Image: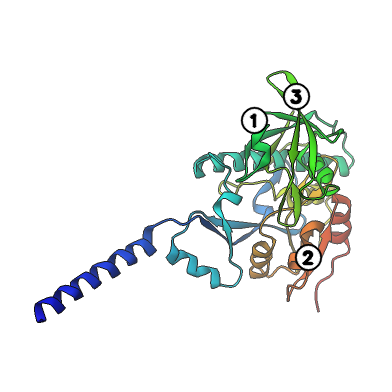
Amino acid sequence: MRVKLAGNRVAIYAVLAVLALVCAFAPTPYSLILPGRALDLGDVVSLAGLTPQAHLYLTDVRFATRVTPLELLSAFTPGVRVIRTDDVLPRGFSPAQYDDIERDAMSESQTIAAAVAERAAGYHVPAPRSRVLILSFSARSDAARVLRPLDVVVSINGTPVATGARLAEVMRGIKAGAVVTVVVVRRGSRRTARVKTGLYGGRTVLGTYLTTVVDAPRLPVAVRYNLPHVAGSSGGLMFALEIYRSLKRDPLPAALRIAGTGTIAYDGTVGPIEGAAQKIAAARAADATLFLVPAENYAEVKDTPGIHVVPVASFGQALKAVASATIPQ
């Protein structure tokens, strides 16, 4: 009897040990978006002979992909969001390949930000040629049925799209689930496809991962960036603000700390981002007093306490928000 009981205990302990190992090491189909940092752009952006004129902060997020069941417990921590890995990592891409895509997006956003800022500051910057390239497809995407990676998107329902921001603008006028006509160029040949749209984050989407390929413009003022461990395109708005205010040599009160996020297009349109709640958490941790957020993400963070949140849809609106910002009393 005692031998049998001891044997049962060994089996139970073995099962518990296996379960512990599974919880500690087995990946799940989920990922975490966590608050990142608020980076002073005065330490990141440099223009020859010019000094930073304001405390402007770029906010980012941290991604933990395919987390274990044990790591999923951190979802109960304030500011942490759980998402399916398939919703953030393009199908068929490894995390390393996705990081390469995000680094390219960062480089592109920096080029666009400099062009927008210098044009707004009065410099002549010709609009460069651009095109929208399909990289991959999200899980359960209908687009994967008829489109291919490296297709160049020409138009949606007859409306030309030359940038990701313009494509997003066109999609805003389409109801999720509707079928759209997409014209692409594939290996030099124009093709037409019918694609059923989907819904993601409250927005109508094609179910594709895209990048805007831009012929680099010739900038009147050279801009350098020192940001080795941040990727993605969501810093475009704050880069542009930092460059603009340095060019105009228009200082803000030293006690005013402005943070924000948002993509930016060559026409100055500010586009939506992922992780608004996590980015505003990073801004608050850095004692920012004002947070600029794309208008499409405003509902996610409008009630955040302890910081003034301003929605912006264009670079012009962002400039006005910064110019009218005051130090909280």
* Residue 217 appearing in the image: no
Q: Give me the C-alpha separation between circle 2 and circle 3.
A: 38 Å
Residue that numbered label 1 is attached to: 148
> Is mark 3 in CB contact (under 8 Å) with mark 1?
no
Residue at image mark 3: 191
When the figure is inspected, residue 300 is found, relative to residue 60, above or below; the finding is below
| Badge 1 amino acid | Arg
Regarding mark 2 in the picture, which secondary structure is present there?
Answer: helix
For marks 1 and 2, the one nearer the N-term is 1
Question: Which residue sits at x=58%, y=66%?
Answer: 80
- Pick whichever, 149 or 116, lies toward us: 149
Quadrant holding the C terminus = bottom right
Q: What x and y, as percent, mark residue 145?
A: 65, 35
Q: Which residue is mark 2?
A: 299
* Residue 84 vertical position relative to residue 103 in the rendered view, above or below: below
Residue 188 sits in which quadrant? top right
Are the two marked residues, 1 and 2, in contact with CB atoms closer than 8 angstroms? no
* 144 horizontally vs 196: left or right: left
Residue 4, position as x, y percentages in the image: 13, 76
Q: Which residue is rendered at x = 52% and y = 57% of the image?
A: 30
* Residue at x 75% of width, y 57% of height: 202
Q: CA separation, marks 3 and 1?
A: 11 Å
Q: Nearer the viewer, mark 2 or mark 3?
A: 3
Q: Amino acid at mark 2?
A: Ala
Vertical comparison of 284 with 54: above or below: below
Q: Where the N terminus falls, by quadrant?
A: bottom left
Which marked residue is nearer to the observer: mark 1 or mark 2? 1
Residue occupying the far front of the picture: 1
First reached walking from the N terminus: tag 2 or tag 3: 3
Element under disc 3:
strand
